[in-house]
Image: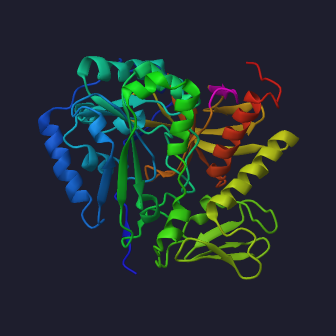
């Protein structure tokens, strides 16, 4: 089959000792910018070029309820690298700012920050309480009179279903008091799933639907709970199921490459870290169990198929992790390479360390004893984890508003499990099923 790799963005990386990095000045906060007509037209041209060959089509619903230039909060599911292009194709010529991860501002001796701000991007830290982000979004709505595009999941979907959303989104909608648009793309995940080694299934078309989820009047009338439930329902997608229902086949010979990044635990023998997705199937080296990934995205075992639907398999792994946490047996204990972000000039490689994750949260030590960071389990509802991050390696990211620690496990620890554990641990503490952990 014709094989193509995604044009993934790299970043600027420098080696520097930990103390020197910690002494670097932090960037000053800047107000978001209103994107001018030049940038809007340039992005329109570039996105049309990038989307060529995707068969892109979209439909809208309810846009007659809102003003053409009325500031709106735009929510979109986060499935692959082309989400931004999809949004620009649908929303042009509406002027909008974009909430995005602050590591996307790094590179080219500060030039990348200028470009990102010029095209309306607002930097934030994923899964960290960031009051300044709320202030920046309000500045866009009330001062710049622009809309704001936000990916509330914050990270790409691993299994083709929604990633954990922030709690009580309804409170945020009440505070902003602007109409809410929901954009859902179809086919983007199936065309380029994150686990699949950046390889593109070129035969899968991309479509999208943009719906006015709430008008200002509806936001004022509905309760916080009703608004939150409405947003959660809007993110109730399942792209493996969608693929089967649409009858879209992915016959590529590489369709299971990297599948072990999601399915890290054998459903037959329970072994972890022994799965290998390669070609059209995934195999456990411990018990020899093998599943083929069919062109319609289903798992089919040589013998009895215990779980055929990948999101169901991922949910089974979630339940297994939750039970480990309740039993007190969950543990990540591994050596890591450490990089940090403190500004927009570079990602700084500061050396080696050790990362522990258990019911007490994260503990990162390293850099010849100079680094010691802890993060309590009730602090973050999810985890910034990624595959082949900026073409470096699989990554686990922890930190606060001042610094981000990017940890690259040396023993191929499944970052999907660490994300699941972070989410389930947070839920269990909120449900008071685990005793509180104090600093």
Res 276 quadrant in image: bottom right
Depicted 165 relative to depicted 71: above or below: below
Front residue of this view, candidates 74 and 280? 74
Q: Which residues are magenta?
A: 371-380
Place of residue 244 in the rendered image (x, y in percent of width and height, measured from the top left) = 53, 70
Please indicate whether residue 280 sits to the left or right of residue 49 in the image: right
Quadrant location, the C terminus: top right
Place of residue 311 in the rendered image (x, y in percent of width and height, measured from the top left) = 63, 59
Res 76 quadrant in image: top left
Residue name at image x 66 percent, y 61 percent: 263
Please indicate whether residue 363 sits to the left or right of residue 56 in the image: right
Please indicate whether residue 53 sits to the left or right of residue 432 in the image: left
Residue 180 is a magenta residue: no
Residue name at image x 45 percent, y 73 percent: 248
Place of residue 280 in the rendered image (x, y in percent of width and height, measured from the top left) = 56, 77
Depicted 25 relative to depicted 268: above or below: above
Front residue of this view, candidates 419 and 388? 419
Q: How is the image coloured?
A: rainbow
Place of residue 206 in the rendered image (x, y in percent of width and height, measured from the top left) = 36, 61
Residue name at image x 69 percent, y 61 percent: 313
Please indicate whether residue 354 sits to the left or right of residue 27 in the image: right
Q: Is residue 73 visible?
A: yes
Q: How many marks?
A: 0
Quadrant location, the N terminus: bottom left
Q: Is residue 345 visible?
A: no
Residue lying at the far left in this picture: please name it.
38
Residue lying at the far right in this picture: please name it.
327
């Amino acid at each position: 089959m014709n094989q193509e790799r995604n044009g993934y963005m790299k970043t600027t990386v420098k080696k520097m000792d930990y103390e020197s990095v910690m002494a670097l000045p932090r960037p000053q906060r800047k107000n978001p910018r209103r994107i001018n007509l030049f940038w809007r037209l340039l992005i329109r041209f570039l996105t049309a070029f990038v989307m060529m060959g995707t068969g892109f089509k979209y439909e809208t619903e309810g846009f007659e309820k809102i003003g053409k230039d009325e500031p709106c909060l735009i929510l979109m599911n986060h499935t692959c690298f082309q989400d931004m292009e999809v949004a620009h194709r649908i929303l042009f010529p509406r002027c909008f700012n974009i909430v995005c991860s602050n590591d996307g501002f790094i590179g080219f001796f500060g030039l990348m920050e200028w470009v990102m701000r010029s095209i309306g991007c607002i930097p934030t830290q994923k899964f960290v309480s960031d009051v300044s982000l709320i202030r920046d979004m309000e500045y866009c709505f009330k001062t710049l009179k622009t809309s704001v595009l936000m990916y509330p999941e914050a990270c790409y979907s691993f299994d083709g279903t929604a990633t954990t959303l922030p709690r009580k989104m309804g409170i945020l909608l009440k505070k902003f008091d602007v109409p809410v648009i929901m954009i859902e793309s179809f086919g983007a995940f199936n065309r380029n799933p994150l686990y699949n080694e950046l390889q593109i299934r070129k035969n899968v078309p991309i479509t999208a639907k943009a719906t006015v989820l709430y008008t200002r009047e509806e936001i004022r009338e509905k309760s916080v709970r009703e608004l939150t439930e409405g947003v959660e329902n809007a993110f109730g997608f399942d792209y493996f199921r969608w693929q089967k229902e649409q009858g879209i086949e992915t016959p590529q010979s590489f369709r299971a490459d990297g599948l072990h990044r999601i399915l890290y635990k054998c459903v037959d023998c329970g072994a972890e870290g022994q799965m290998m997705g390669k070609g059209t199937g995934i195999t456990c080296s411990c018990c020899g169990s093998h599943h083929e990934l069919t062109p319609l995205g289903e798992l089919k075992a040589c013998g009895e198929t215990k779980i055929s639907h990948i999101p169901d398999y991922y949910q089974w792994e979630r339940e297994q992790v939750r039970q480990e946490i309740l039993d007190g047996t969950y543990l990540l204990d591994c050596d890591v390479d450490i990089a940090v972000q403190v500004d927009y000039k570079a990602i700084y490689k500061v050396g080696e360390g050790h990362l522990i994750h258990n019911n007490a949260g994260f503990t990162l030590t390293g850099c010849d004893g100079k680094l010691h960071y802890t993060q309590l389990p009730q602090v973050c509802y999810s985890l910034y984890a990624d595959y082949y991050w900026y073409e470096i390696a699989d990554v686990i990211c922890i930190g606060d508003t001042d610094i981000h620690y990017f940890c690259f496990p040396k023993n191929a620890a499944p970052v999907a499990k660490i994300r699941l554990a972070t989410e389930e641990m947070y839920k269990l503490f909120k449900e008071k099923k685990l005793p509180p952990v104090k600093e």
